[in-house]
Amino acid sequence: MTTVAELLIESLAQHGVRQVWGVVGDALNPVTDAIRREDRVEWMAVRHEEAAAFAASAQSQLTDDLAVCMGTVGPGAIHLLNGLYDAKKSRTPVLAICGQVPREEIGSDFFQEVDNDVLFADVSVFCETVTSVDQVPRIIEQAVNAALSERGVAVLSLPGDVGGLDLPKDTPLPRFVTEQPELAPTSDAVRAAAGAINAAGSVTFLVGMGARHARDEVLRAAELLAAPMVLSLKAKEGFDDDNPFEIGQSGLIGNPATARALESCDVLVLIGTDFPYPEFLPTGKTVVQIDVRGAHVGRRTPVDHAVVGDSRLALAALLPLLQEKTDRGHLEEARTVYEKWAGGQEHFTHADYDHKKVGLLRRRVDNPDGLVRPELLAAALERHADPDAVFTTDTGMSTVWLSRFIRMSGRRRMLGSYNLGSMANAMPMALGAQALDRDRQVIALCGDGGLTMLLGDLITAVTEELPVKLVVFDNGRLGMVKLEMEQVGLPEFGTFLHNPDFAKVAEALGMRGIRVTDPREVDAAVADALAHPGPVLLDVLTNPDEIALPPKPTLAQGWGFAIAKSKEFVVSPE
C-alpha cells in the first residue's frame, strides 16, 4: 500500500524536485520518512524554518520551477511565512507542506493549533487542508498546478493522522501541468504603441526582469530608437553585460544618467517591469507599457498605450513597425553622463593600496583607521568571482554595493529579497542556490544585521557540506536605516550593532573564517576565500559612514544630513 505522504513525495520527485527544506516534527513525520526512502529527493535540515522558505524561494527563482519547504504544526508553519512572502512577491512557484493537529482536534484550540487556511490565505495562491484520502491525488495536483501556473505559493496542510494513511491500490500518481502558454498582444495595441513612439523625438527604455528572455528584441529596439536603457535591479541579469545602451539603475540605487534620461525623453517605454517607486518616474511623458499582466499596467504611473502580452512576442510584433531615429543625441548624452559617473566610482575600487593612497581615500570620506570602504570589497568580489557565480544580497546597503560594483556578466545570477525587502535573506538563499549545484560558486553579500537574524543556519552550510562564500559587510550598523534617518535630519538611534568576531564564530561552527580590517588585505582575502573548497565566512570591517547618494540629491536631503551629523556630534548615540 502507498500512503498519502509517499504519494506526495513520489509525485514531487517525478516532477523533478530534488530537495525539500525544513525542520522535522511530529505531524510531518510520515513525510520526512517518505523522503528518507526516496532516493531522488534530499532532505535539507535547517535550524529555522524561515531559512527553509528562503532557500526554496531561491531555488525556484534559479530553476524557474517548483521548490518545496516544510514546517510542522503551529510554530513550525508560522516560521515559514517570511520566506514564503518573499516567494509570493518574487512571483515564483513554491510548495509549502505544513503540519496540522489531528483531524478530530481541529477547531478545539488544541496544543500548537493554528488555522493554516487563515494564516496562509494572503501569501498563497492555493491553501487547503487534506482531511480525507478521497481528496488525494486531486488536491496535490491542484496545489502544484496553482503554484506553477500562477507563479506563487501553494500551501498544503497535513493533519498529523493523515500523512500515514494508506491509499487505495489503484490511486494514480499526481501529474502536473508544466507548459505555460505565452500571451501575445493584440495587433491594435501594438500599432497604437508604434505610432506614439514614431511620432516622438527621444525615447527612453525602463527594462525589468520580465524582459530578460527578450534580450535580443530589446537591444534591437534600443538600437533602432537610439534609446538609453534604464535597468531595474533584477534586470541586471540579462542586460548588464555587453550592452551599449545600458545606463544603470534608477531609484535610490540610481545615478545622474538615469535621472537625466528619464526627465529628458518624450516617450518612456516600460518593458517587463513593475518598478515600484513612482517618485523616480518622470511626469508629462507619453508612456508605453509592455507587460504580460494587465493588472500591472498603470499602477506606477499613468500609461497612454498598454501592450498586454509577453515582452518577447510584443517586441517582435512592434519592431517591424518602428521607424529608425537618426538623431542619437539623447542616447549619447545619457551614455556620456553614465560613463563619467561610472569613472568617478573607480577611485573607490583600487586594490593596490599604498600608504599614500589609503590616506587619500580616508581624507575623502573621513574613513576611520582600520575600516574598509565597502565599495572596495564589492569591486574585489567583481574581479575574482567566477563568470557563472550566483550572488545573493541582503536588503540594504549590501544590495547597493552589488548594484553599483558587480556586473552580471557571463552566466552570473543574482538573488535577493528585492520585492519584499526582508532582512536575513542572503545567507539562506545562498544555501538554496548552492544545494542545486555544489560545484558552482555562490557568494552571499551579507549585512551584519541580516546575518545575525538567522545566524544559526551557518551550521546548515557545514552540516550539508555546502561550500558557500558568505561575505559580511561588517559596519556595526543597520546601514540603510541609518541613511534613512540622517537624510531627514534625525540622528541615528537604535542602529548600532554589538557584533562578535564573525570569523571566530564561523571557525567555532566548523567553517573557515577570515577577518579583514586593513584595506590593503581585501583583495588577497577575497581571492583566498573564493578559492577555498568548503564554506567560508569573510568578515570585513567596513566604514559605517559610507553613503549611496540618490540620482539627484535634494537640498532638503543635504540639510538633513548636515543637521543629523551636527546632532550626532553633540550627543553621540554610543
Image (cartoon, helix red, strand yellow):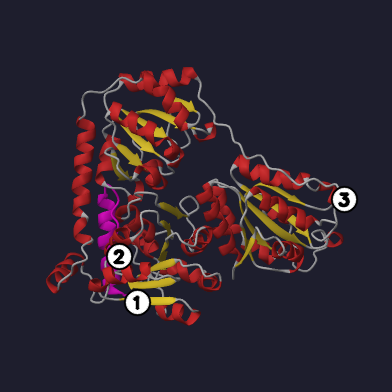
Residue 43 falls in which quadrant of the image? bottom right
At label 2, the amino acid type is: Leu
Residue 330 image label? none
Position in image of residue 202 (x %, y %): 27, 27
Residue 407 among magenta residues: no
Query: Bounds of the magenta span?
Result: 545-572
Asked if residue 499 can be seen in this view, the reply is no
Q: Secondary structure at mark 3?
A: loop
Q: Kindly give the residue lying farthest to the left in the view shown.
A: 356
At label 3, the amino acid type is: Pro
Disc 3 + disc 1, Cβ < 8 Å: no
Q: Please say if 554 is above or below 113.
A: above
* Residue bearing the label numbered 3: 168
Going by the image, does 506 lie left or right of 345? right
Position in image of residue 368 (x %, y %): 24, 74
Q: Please say if 518 is above or below 396.
A: below
* Residue bearing the label numbered 1: 515
In the rendered image, the quadrant that contains the N terminus is bottom right
